[in-house]
Image: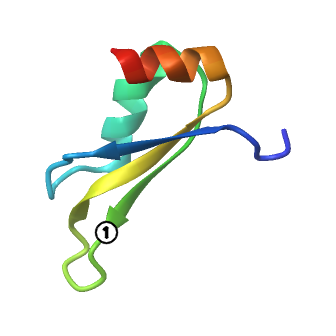
Amino acid sequence: MNGAGWCIFVYNLAPETEENVLWQLFGPFGAVQSVKVIRDLQTNKCKGFGFVTMTNYDEAVVAIQS
């Protein structure tokens, strides 16, 4: 795989959100390539948003619509 995928912006996340939560939420919809929770550099808490990259376009669409 060349790293290409369909990136989904996820927002309204709690400060305690960890990457594994995004894997668990999006995994049932298809192949998740990567997840990234954006963190505050000083507190290391989630800044309220992140990104999920899915391999398949159709699976990404279903995940967004759900």
Q: Residue at x 30, y 54 (%)?
A: 49
The foreground one among 52 and 8 is 8
Residue beneath the point at 38% across and 17% down:
65
Q: Which residue is mark 1?
A: 39
Q: Residues within 10 Å of mark 1 (few under 14, many from 20)?
A: some
Name the side, left or right, on which 3 lies relative to 17.
right
Q: Is residue 51 left or right of residue 31?
A: left
**Where does residue 59 sit, x and y in percent of width and height?**
57, 16
- Quarter occupied by the C terminus: top left
Q: Position of residue 43 (x, y in %)?
A: 19, 79
Where is residue 35 drawn, in percent x and y? Answer: 49, 46
Please identify the quadrant where the N terminus is shown.
top right
Figure label count: 1
| In the displayed structure image, the side of residue 61 where residue 57 appears, left or right | right
Dot 1 lies on which element?
strand
Image point 34% across, 26% down: which residue?
25
Amino acid carrying label 1: it is: Arg
Residue 38, picture quadrant = bottom left
Task: Tell which residue pokes out farthest to the bottom in this image.
Answer: 42
